[in-house]
Amino acid sequence: MAYSQKLLDYFQNPRCVGEIVDASGIAEVSNPVCGDVMKLWVKVADGRIVDAKFKAQGCSAAIATSSYATEMIIGRDVNAAKSITKEEIAEALGGLPAGKIHCSVLACDAIREALK
Amino acid sequence: MMPVFTEHFGNASSIHWFGQQAKTMIDDARSKVAKLINAETSEIVFLSGGTEADNLAIRGIAESQKSRGKHIITSQIEHHAVMHTCKDLEKQGYEVTWIPVSRDGLVDPGNIQRALRPDSILISIMHANNEIGTIQPIEEIGAIAEAADVYFHSDGVQSTGKIPVDVRRLKVDMYSISGHKIHGPKGAGALFIRKGTILKPLMTGGGHERNRRSGTENVAGIVGLGEAARLARLGLSTEMPRVEALRNRLEAGLKARIEMIHVNGEDAPRLPNTSNIMVDFAEGEGLVISLDLKGVAVSTGSACSSGSLEPSHVLTAIGKTPDEAHGSLRLSLSALTTEEDIDYVIHVLPGIVERLRELSPYYKKV
Ligand SMILES: Cc1ncc(COP(=O)(O)O)c(C=O)c1O
Ligand SMILES: [Zn+2]
């Protein structure tokens, strides 16, 4: 299998799953390439992300990157969160196989959309 | 197979004694393969596998018949070995009619009849599909081809050894076989070529295999394929009914324990060993990885795992949307599959599906 242990861990035990009732921003994005979908809820206070939750229907890479990115933005200020790149996410998870890089786009798109 | 590497290492074209020994072993393998599909020994050509068999059949006829016409009829659910070969011929000026299939994955022979033209030279329709296992009405299509005097090739890679095959009854002129699909070695295969079929070889050289396929024979591969063919023939009556019962147990067990799953091609004649199921609100690659982590090897038609990032052309052809194909799972059984294996999958898959569905933003518990 071409996935790292860390990615598999985030796929099997995803963090930050769920919904936020009083979210300040919600995004629902789908990957035009393969059809994976991610929904992200964020709660912002004083320009900082105080909570984030996600749900996703997609491949293991999509679920793992969605979970990791959601966890990553909690506590960050909005502008820093918006500047997160797909490469950063992929790298943090031990890299993605060449054909799966597009899966990490999903999380970046969702973050930008939810913080718009 | 092993003695071929250690003791009988002769070249089958040589006249010295160990060359002749190799020739005897190849001939023996040839008669075993012939027997499996009711062909004559001289009608079996050994080559590198199913892909080469498909290429030789299609390109061989396209080349030899081009003065007669350049129209080829095939289906929308062929293996890539046929599909990409036909697409390549399209680029070379051949015209291809791509016959659609029903939602059950079946070709309607009437559509073949209607597609025939005076310049048609070849019909190529697979016997059984590699993703959903549906078995095409080859005998009926064979009768149509014969009446129209058009060559008929069938890719039999999946059907050989799983269901009885009689090339005379099916009226095929060419039939592709692959070693590794019948528990034989990879890189060995055969093409049945009916006596009298005019086809231009892909390989030119020393004139091996009655001028159909030049190149020193892969003796070990051929011997392995021959033995696999012999065992497969025996297994047709002993193993396959058991495999089919296991497949049915698997599908019944999963349907009873998982909501919102569908079996593709369920109402069509199907191979005994194939099950293609569609799981709503879960994605196929995630299912495959989850099962893999539990020691179960399966595959999917999801775009996410295809490399090309396109959903399977077979699932698309049976009318599935990319979203539906996204959640497809293909489970293949064999004579080596046990009841414990099946019960294990029935035991672990519901939890995996449930977990992935819980993660889906669209799934609502019913
Ligand atoms: C229907 C079908 N045709 C052709 C092939 C290609 O056979 P091979 O791998 O021996 O080249 C396969 C193999 O997966 C197949 O399933
Ligand atoms: Zn994906």
Image (cartoon, coloured by chain):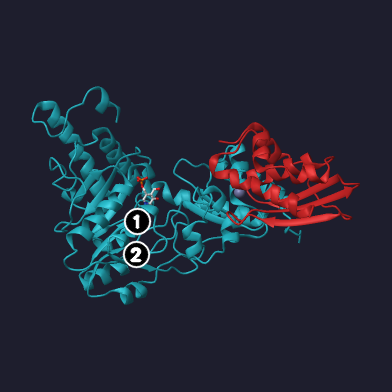
Numbered tag placed on residue B82 in the rendering:
1
| x and y percentages locating residue B32 in the rendered image | 24, 44
* Residue that appears at 29% across and 42% down: B48
Identify residue for label 2. B74
Q: Is residue B221 above or below residue B78?
A: above
Q: What amino acid type is highlighted by mark number 1?
A: Val
| x and y percentages locating residue B233 in the rendered image | 32, 47
* Residue that appears at 20% across and 58% down: B63
Q: CA distance from mark 2 to mark 1?
A: 9 Å
Give the cyan chain's letter. Answer: B
| x and y percentages locating residue A91 in the rendered image | 65, 35
Give the red chain's letter. Answer: A
| x and y percentages locating residue B335 in the rendered image | 44, 43
Report whether the residue tagged 1 is closer than 8 Å to ligand 1.
yes
Q: In this rendering, does residue B352 appear at all?
A: yes
Label 1's element? helix
**B172 on left or right of A49:** left
Q: Nearer the viewer, residue B284 or A32?
A: A32
**Badge 1 sits on which subunit?**
B
